[in-house]
Amino acid sequence: MKKVSQFSFLALLVMATSILAAEQPLTSGYFKWLLHLGQSPTDRILDGSLHGAQLGFVGKDETLRPIPGEVYDFSNTHIRSTTELMIWTPQYSASGSFTHKPLEGQYIHYYHIYVMSPSKRDAHLRFVASEGLRVWNNGQLLFDGWPNVFQEAYIDFVLDEGVNSMTFKVLKYDQNATYLAAGILLK
């Protein structure tokens, strides 16, 4: 698998107009913008069996640092996806709920966000998910498991001073829709 290094004019335009959407101030609600691996909300990695696998050509899941418009090329790889070229695309949800109707089979959605913190401080990750979920902040695994479906959960962690890089890996195994809402509360 290789990372595509050339961007089209359109990808550069998307990146230039949406980079601020990926860096959000802390608010009391759920995140409204997340980067999603795929141009469409239904784009996804098609093998749910990849739960333990990594997007190894760009590094481990916990070290992903995507930017809007960055292209991953899945052609000629063992990883099946809805399209061979997957672009990290900002997605907006007014409610903070990133929900997808049930799609056939097992699959994985990747989401990412950068959160600025003026100082190192204790925080709670607040989230609701319908399926398996892994969450990393700056490479540290915060959660790996199966939250109670549609019940809010909290994980204590430390926001580092400066930019914090958070990756969400949502794993779908049953016939339900996938659902993710996440936010940060300061302690």
Image (cartoon, grey):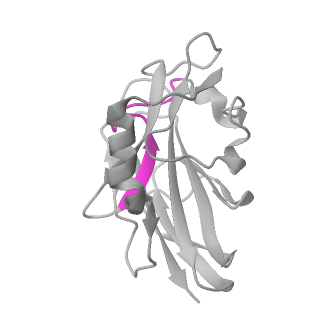
Residue 4 position by quadrant: top right
Q: Position of residue 127 (x, y in %)?
A: 49, 66
Magenta extent: 33-46
Q: Please say if 79 is above or below 14.
A: above
Depth check: give the residue in front, 71 or 10: 10
Outermost residue, left side: 94
* Residue 35, placed above or below residue 46: below
- From this view, report whether residue 167 is shown above or below residue 10: below
Q: Quadrant of residue 14?
A: top left
Please identify the quadrant where the C terminus is shown.
bottom right
Q: Position of residue 79 (x, y in %)?
A: 61, 20
Residue in the foreground of this view, choosing between 102 and 181: 181
Q: Is residue 132 visible?
A: yes
x then y, percent, for residue 6 = 51, 27
Please tell me whether the stretch drawn in magenta is mainly helix, strand or loop. Answer: loop
Q: Position of residue 171 (x, y in %)?
A: 54, 40
Give 103 or 111, whichever is nearer the viewer. Answer: 111
Q: Is residue 167 left or right of residue 27?
A: right
Query: Is residue 176 at all visible to an observer of this figure?
Result: no
**Extreme residue in the top direction:** 76
**Does the stretch in magenta take in 58?**
no
Q: Which residue is at 65% across, 29% downward?
A: 50
Identify the image quadrant of residue 55. Answer: top right
Q: Which residue appears at 44% of the width and 34% of the height?
A: 87
Q: Is residue 40 magenta?
A: yes
Query: At 34% across and 39% down in the image, what residue appears?
Result: 41
Q: Residue 75, relative to residue 34: is it above or below?
A: above
Q: Is residue 29 left or right of residue 172?
A: left
